[in-house]
Amino acid sequence: MASLPSLSISSTAHKIESDSRKLSSSSSSVEKGLSFHRSQEVLLESSIEALQPFEPALYTPLLQRCSEIKPLSAAEALHAHVLKTGTHENLLVSTSLVNTYMKCGASAHAHKLFNVVPQKNIVTWTTLISGYARNNQADEAVRVFIQLRESGFYPTNFTLGPVFNACSSLYSMELGKQLHGYIIKYHLESDTSMGNSLCSLYSKCRSLEYAVKAFQRIPNKYVISWTTIISSCGDNGNAELGLKIFHDMLLEDAFPNEFTLTSALSLCTETQSFGLGKQVHAFCVKYGCESSVPMKNSIMYFYLKSGRLKKP
């Protein structure tokens, strides 16, 4: 017995039993021209076939592997094994399978499995909603969220995050306001991620006023909070407000990152604030992000629009 190095599940007695004939066949196929990605799929599928029933939690590494290399056939083979051994009754395994199907881009498979999970919990619902949002199926994400509420479940901040993303994709101000009301009702406004999501949603729905108010209510503002509202000002045609907020950020000793500085430099370009733009450029040098491609492009464009092709 030997465990496959790339698919080792545990150092316990539960190990994947390799089938030398199948591995030889896999190696032979690879030598005939299979890509490395396909060879990984072959190894994964052959290891699944050799599995024996073991503790439900030990399915997680294989499911994770399926999610990484995204072979739908391997996910289906593992699902069949789960059904065969009766492990599908374990909620952790079923939820992980839903997640794996979503990451493989098989939304229909994920939803079909979700429908037969007997005792869904909020994690199961969140997994399906997150998958739809991640796969750019915003309508489905919102529809499942509505079903979640009708089923009597209470979403957490982890559930609401992808729903906000879906609302932003749909430019749904109405649903966004309903979610905002839910956040206020259940005292989730103090969660920074919720504030960031609200700010982003209102910005995409062209309501900078609401976006700024959502930003101001965030008790603990991190760099992503500042960056979101600064870029929102630029997206909504209020560069001067964005630069003011950038100034406030520096006064509060918050450290900008590459994305913050890129947004700030774009605002300087728009307002033709050459002096301030030079200071932002100095920040880029100070924080070591001048060499990144987006930052280089922003700096070059800034000097070009300022009528100075070369740095003074």
Image (cartoon, rainbow, N blue to C red):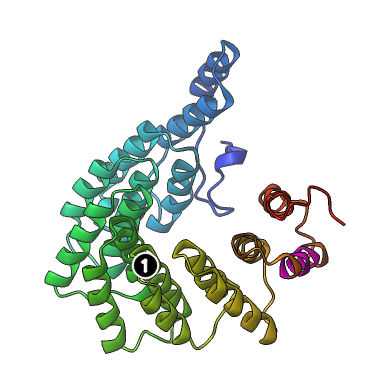
Q: Secondary structure at mark 1?
A: helix
Left or right: residue 297 versus residue 18 is right
- Image quadrant of residue 7? top right
Q: Amino acid at mark 1?
A: Leu
The verdict on residue 280 being magenta is: yes
Q: Residue furthest front?
A: 307
Residue 110 in the image, given as x and y percentages of width and height: 27, 47
User: Against 270, is 16 above or below?
Assistant: above
User: Is 128 part of what is drawn in magenta?
Assistant: no
Measured as percent of width and height from the top left, residue 129 is found at 29, 59
**Of residues 143 and 234, the one drawn nearer to the viewer in this rendering:** 234
Q: Is residue 6 left or right of residue 307?
A: left
> Residue placed at 52% from the left, 32% from the top?
18
Q: Residue at the location (82% across, 62% down)?
A: 285
Q: Position of residue 120 (x, y in %)?
A: 22, 64
Quarter of the image where the N terminus is located: top right
Q: Which quadrant of the figure contains the C terminus?
A: bottom right
User: Dot 1 corresponds to which residue?
Assistant: 201
Above or below, 298 relative to 276: above
Residue at (57% x, 19% y) in the render: 27
Res 311 visible: yes
Task: Please provide percent x and percent y for residue 228.
Answer: 51, 69
Tell me: 17 left or right of 268. left
Residue 151 in view in this figure: no
Return the residue nearer the eye: 215 or 42: 215
Pick whichever, 240 or 150, lies toward us: 240
Question: Dot 1: within a 10 Å radius of its alpha carbon, few (fewer than 14), some, or many (20 or more) residues?
Answer: many
Helix, strand or loop: magenta stretch: helix
Point out the stretch of residues depicted in magenta: 276-283
